[in-house]
Image (cartoon, grey):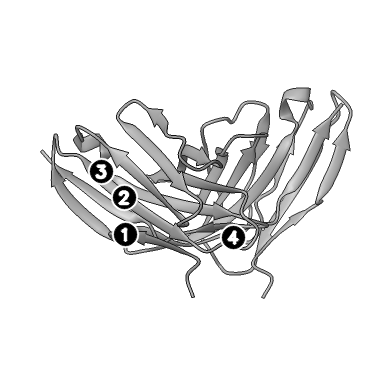
Amino acid sequence: EDKVVQSPLSLVVHEGDTVTLNCSYEVTNFRSLLWYKQEKKAPTFLFMLTSSGIEKKSGRLSSILDKKELFSILNITATQTGDSAIYLCAYRDDKIIFGKGTRLHILP
Amino acid sequence: NAGVTQTPKFRILKIGQSMTLQCAQDMNHNYMYWYRQDPGMGLKLIYYSVGAGITDKGEVPNGYNVSRSTTEDFPLRLELAAPSQTSVYFCASSYTLLGDLYGYTFGSGTRLTVV
């Protein structure tokens, strides 16, 4: 049974649109919730979230965590074709557990 | 069913010493990675390998070297340890299928302190 569930599994939007990616998780011994962007090689780090309700921002990307409801969202505003990638959510307790990812494709 | 095995689990090094962090996987995964996680930060990619004999730099490769002589093993070498390399190191592996990466599996980590 998956401990980290991401939705949607894939998404196709036009350049300039705003997208919201979802991640829900099960708790055992929660330490942090991580977001990664994966293009052709290994995942690269975007955000680490440990506290509820505090938004983290980096340019057009932002993310927030809800520890009560056990989910996180990743927002990308004014999307560009370079945002096309798989976005991975990972939850850390004693291990690091990745979700299956959301495949995002931005059409020019 | 070992998955990804990292050794050692803990190590204290003196500045200037060298060491090798070992990583082995028994899942026949072609991709392997080394990440480091500093306190309060997410994982940063050090090096990765897409198959035996092929390695490439990640986000933070300085001060490290890797080799991939077999599919199973992906050791990470620190030549001249510095306090900035105090971190928790994670090895991971995955496989490719039709161009996508699947089956991410992480080791349990190596906690390294450089004093």
Q: In the drawing, does residue A96 fall left or right of residue B86?
A: left
The crowd level at tag 3 (other Cα within 10 Å; few <14, some 14-19, many 20+) is some
Which residue in the protein does label 3 denote? A84
Q: Is residue A39 visible?
A: no
Q: CA distance from mark 3 to mark 4?
A: 30 Å
Chain of the residue that carries numbered disc 3 in the rendered image: A
A58 or A83: which is nearer to us? A58
Residue shown at 19% from the left, 32% from the top: A78
Chain of the residue that carries numbered disc 2 in the rendered image: A
User: Which numbered mark, 3 or 4, is in the foreground of this view?
Assistant: 3
Please, what is the three-letter code of the amino acid marked with disc 1? Ser
Residue shown at 54% from the left, 41% from the top: A51
Q: Secondary structure at mark 2?
A: strand
User: Which numbered mark, 2 or 3, is in the foreground of this view?
Assistant: 2
Q: In the drawing, does residue A20 fall left or right of residue B96?
A: left
Q: Secondary structure at mark 3?
A: loop
User: Which numbered mark, 4 or 1, is in the foreground of this view?
Assistant: 1
Q: Is residue B48 visible?
A: yes
Q: Secondary structure at mark 4?
A: loop
> Between disc 3 and disc 1, whose residue precedes?
1
Residue B56 image point, x, y percent: 51, 39
Which residue in the protein does label 1 denote? A7
Q: Are marks 2 and 1 in contact (CB under 8 Å)?
A: yes
Give the numbered dot on residue A21: 2
